[in-house]
Image (tube, helix red, strand yellow):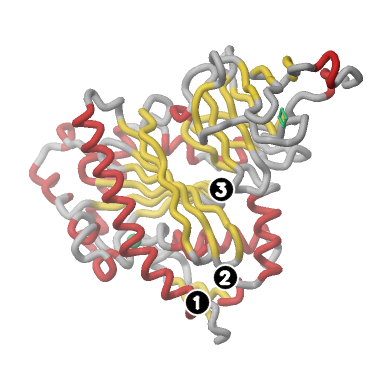
Amino acid sequence: MQREQLVTEIKSLMALVDDKTTDLADSVMEIDVREYYDPGQFEREKIELFRNYPQFVGPSCMIPEPGDYFAFDDTGIPILVVRNQERELRAFVNICSHRGAPLNECESGKAKNGRLFSCPYHGWSYDLEGSLVGVPFGKQGFDSIDRATLGLKPLQVEEKDGMIFVMPNPDRRFDIDEVLGGIGQRLSGFGFEDHYYLGSKQVHTDFSWKLNMDTFHEYYHFEFLHPETIGQMAYSNLATYHQYGRNHSMGSATLQINELKEISEDEWNPRAYSSYVNYIFPNTVIFVVEDHFQTWRVYPISPDRSVVYHSMFLPQEPENAQQRQEYEDYFQMINDVAVAEDYSLVDKINRGVNCGIERKVLVGRNEPGVQNMHRQLHELLGRE
Ligand code: FES
Ligand SMILES: [Fe+2]
């Protein structure tokens, strides 16, 4: 958001504080509890949401330079995204044409000499356009192959408003503007192009990816579940809500926001008094805090198992080892709060979900973010 938008948002938040309310949905929503564990629904979600729907990969700054790559295989299709010499992105199915090994050895890094992927199994190599350019012992061992047909299978990848999206299914195309639904305009100004990628943490959870996502979409639980942590920093049950296509963005106020009433508006530092949960359908939250942002990407494994990747992006590279350690400690602390407070509670919710009692899950008017995710799922999966 640019300053003018941030100031407007701050005013909305201050009005919510004064009125002791929050942005509201039109009505209470009911979700059939079976949606959280039904194996048939789970299979449809894996195909329609994670194979046939464009996936948020990361902000542009995660792979900023030619040769930088990022690989993940949590959608069911191994994917390799790389920035080529012209600084454009390319994406491929990450399966070597020889016997199928993935080409990367780390989740992210730099291609060999910034220009080649060399398969770790038998050394076949590919350039950044995915063409097969090297086959060790090829003249004898593979004398009959047509190398021109054995490049990596391309995937559609798009980069816009500082965000990278890829379509896992090689036979599908997508329209980036339709996927963004205009949320890029709201997110501009947060510096997705030029932050420093500190790293990612992987957390495996023994509950549905949707129970996992539900925890990010409302501020109703802060004072009850996080009384000593987040509840000491931000207002509970108070947030602005904005819809962008299938995505949404919510603003939250720090407990000190009324200090701004004593400061003239042109001296406000709005980022110091607000934070933003930005939902990118179906599985990503970009959490923008005062001077940095984090992403949380959640993927299904089975109806009651999921994995989340929590990534940290800083305004600049740490200047020394001590500063790096301070950021690492902060990163760990945030991750620990989510695991210790949110995820340990959701573990218990999951037992109730799977115990065979039929019921409706209720989502209040004060939880429009949770409602949106489920409404979009219903629409896309054809249940409404
Ligand atoms: S599997 Fe890649 S070179 Fe053999
Ligand atoms: Fe929480």
The residue where tag 1 is placed is 361
Comparing 347 with 183, the one in front is 347
Residue at 60% over, 66% down: 303
Residue 161 visible to an observer of this rendering: no
Taking the image as shown, residue 59 lies to the left or right of residue 290, namely: right
300 in relation to 94, above or below: below
The mark closer to the camera, 1 or 2, is 2
The label on residue 190 is none
The label on residue 245 is 3
Please tell me whether mark 1 sits on a helix, a strand or a loop: strand
The x and y percentages for residue 17 are 22, 59
Taking the image as shown, residue 319 lies to the left or right of residue 347, namely: left
* N-term-proximal mark, 3 vs 1: 3
Q: Quadrant of residue 91?
A: top right
Comparing 359 with 331, the one in front is 331
Local packing at callout 3 (Cα closer than 10 Å; few below 14, some 14-19, many 20+) is some
Q: Is mark 1 within 8 Å of ligand 2?
A: no
Q: Quadrant of residue 8?
A: top left
The x and y percentages for residue 62 are 46, 30
Please tell me whether mark 2 sits on a helix, a strand or a loop: helix
Taking the image as shown, residue 166 lies to the left or right of residue 124, namely: left
